[in-house]
């Protein structure tokens, strides 16, 4: 037994001894051992899915036999070009077979640096370019479409097809701002994480924040319409619908409108009360000349103890746009994690910034383009979390980073802060509609 360690279970004892022996012979830290254990678990999953082979895993492990700083320079995820090509080849082969993993997967940044498993919950934020819902007017144009070669048949190589132009458009369809991407990158290996800033595309993986909540609301407002106003509105609408082409005399049609108005008024009150209300209205208007601010209802309440029935009702006034705020505390534990945090902060700042249409600082751009869009989703493993709410496409409206997350300025030897607090504020591009809950494959969740 090594170093006096022992377990009753023979299997656990053997695993413990192998771990301790490996730690003694290769001088690997406890954090590195934990990373290696997670890497091995992920290897088993990928091999079982046929994405990579044991040969690929052996080659990748050979690149990381010694994980000391003297060998890797502090980078625990160095792999050789040879084995990187082998991994890319296996991934591409799996993609051609219909596997969900694609060789064209956008770059990924992640905090924490360790890999995620099929049981890990996290927040996935995909970055895409903004696409306006409208379009400019286009003219008809002719394009050439290649013919498929038919053996033994002499035909033209291309066919000319006329594409009809389209008119200008300024609005999109309802529900058109649902999340469009579904990048399954939750199990990205540590050596597969990006080491460059994300520009216009990419994915950021963050832990689930401490305060997970959503709130849906609509705009409503109180509205009043007394009996006289309602009768008057009905009379005006009837008068405007008069049929001037009808054989019926126009005078008779207007006479009928007047009779209907009188019937509506008499139904709710009598002529004497209407006269009293009209008199109070004139009195209130006259008092306004002398600076008085008295209403008809106030005069009637003082005189008879009555007021006009307002027929008050709460009416729908429109939808609202949802907003979300998150706070993440990030504490780097090694050089790789500090670098990932730096790239994550830079990615958020760069992709929320308005775009100069020229694309360079040398050009005097008269116009600005909309910043990139963020698609947020709670995930568990490589699936959407069905017990947490969904998001629509969002714009990042605000980011605030506190580089003294523990209240004291402190850095590591390379200058990276020991703790960060990052606050993010997102706002969805469109409201939530009922049709969003009826979307295909969206019944097994709490919805938006």
Image: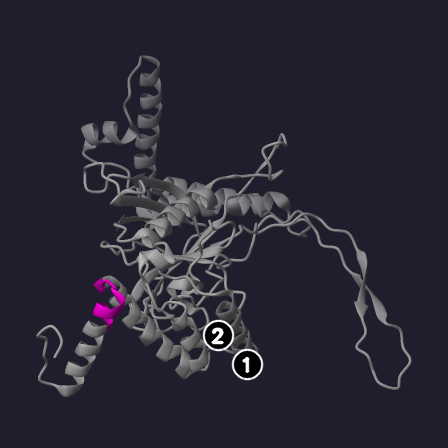
User: Dot 2 corresponds to which residue?
Assistant: 100
Whether residue 163 sits left or right of residue 255 in the image: it is: right
Span colored in magenta: 22-30
User: Dot 1 corresponds to which residue?
Assistant: 97
The mark found on residue 157 in the picture is none
Residue shown at 34%/56% (left/top)? 70
The secondary structure making up most of the magenta span is helix
Task: Specify few, some or many for label 1: CA neighbours under 10 Å numbering under 14, 14-19, or 20 or more.
Answer: few
Whether residue 263 is visible here, answered yes or no, is no
Nearest the viewer among 119 and 9 is 9
Image location of residue 322, percent across then percent down: 36, 50
Image location of residue 317, percent across then percent down: 39, 47
Question: In terms of image quadrants, where is residue 278?
Answer: top left
Task: Specify few, some or many for label 2: CA neighbours under 10 Å numbering under 14, 14-19, or 20 or more.
Answer: few
Residue shown at 45%/80% (left/top)? 55
In what element is the residue under mark 2? loop
Q: Rounded to the nearest whole Å, what is the CA distance between mark 1 and mark 2?
A: 9 Å
Give the position of the C terminus as an image quadrant: bottom left
């Amino acid at each position: 037994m090594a170093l006096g360690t022992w377990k009753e279970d023979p299997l656990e004892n053997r695993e413990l001894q192998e771990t301790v022996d490996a730690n003694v012979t290769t001088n690997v830290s406890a954090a590195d051992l934990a990373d290696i254990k997670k890497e091995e678990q992920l290897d088993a999953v990928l091999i079982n899915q046929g994405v990579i082979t044991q040969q690929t895993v052996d080659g990748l492990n050979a690149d990381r036999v010694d994980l000391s700083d003297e060998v890797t320079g502090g980078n625990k995820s160095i792999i050789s070009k040879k084995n990187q090509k082998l991994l890319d080849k296996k991934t591409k082969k799996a993609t051609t077979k219909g596997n969900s993993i694609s060789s064209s997967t956008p770059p990924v940044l992640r905090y924490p640096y360790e890999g995620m498993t099929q049981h890990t919950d996290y927040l996935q934020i995909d970055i895409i370019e903004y696409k306006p819902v409208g379009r400019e007017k286009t003219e008809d144009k002719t394009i050439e479409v290649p013919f498929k070669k038919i053996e033994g048949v002499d035909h033209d190589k291309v066919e000319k097809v006329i594409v009809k132009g389209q008119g200008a458009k300024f609005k999109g369809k309802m529900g058109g701002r649902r999340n469009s991407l579904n990048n399954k990158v939750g199990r990205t290996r540590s050596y597969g994480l990006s080491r460059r800033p994300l520009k216009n595309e990419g994915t950021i993986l963050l832990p689930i924040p401490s305060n997970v909540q959503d709130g849906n609301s609509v705009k409503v407002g109180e509205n009043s319409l007394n009996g006289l106003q309602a009768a008057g509105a009905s009379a005006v609408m009837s008068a405007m619908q008069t049929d001037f082409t009808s054989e019926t005399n126009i005078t008779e049609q207007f006479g009928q409108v007047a009779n209907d108005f009188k019937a509506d008024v008499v139904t709710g009150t009598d002529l004497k009360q209407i006269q009293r209300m009209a008199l109070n209205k004139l009195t209130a208007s006259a008092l306004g000349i002398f600076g008085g601010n008295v209403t008809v209802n106030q005069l009637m309440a003082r005189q008879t103890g009555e007021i006009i029935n307002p027929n008050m009702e709460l009416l729908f006034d429109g939808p609202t746009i949802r907003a979300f705020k998150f706070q993440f505390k990030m504490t780097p534990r090694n050089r790789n994690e500090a670098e990932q945090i730096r790239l994550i902060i830079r990615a958020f700042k760069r992709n929320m910034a308005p775009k100069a249409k020229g694309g360079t600082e040398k050009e005097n751009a008269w116009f600005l383009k909309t910043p990139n869009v963020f698609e947020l989703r709670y995930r568990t493993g490589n699936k959407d979390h069905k017990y947490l709410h969904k998001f629509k496409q969002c714009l990042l409206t605000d980011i605030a980073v506190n580089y003294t997350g523990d209240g004291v300025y402190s850095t590591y030897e390379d200058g990276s802060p020991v703790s960060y607090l990052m606050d993010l504020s997102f706002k969805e591009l469109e409201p939530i509609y009922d049709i969003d809950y009826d979307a295909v494959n969206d019944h097994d969740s709490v919805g938006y």
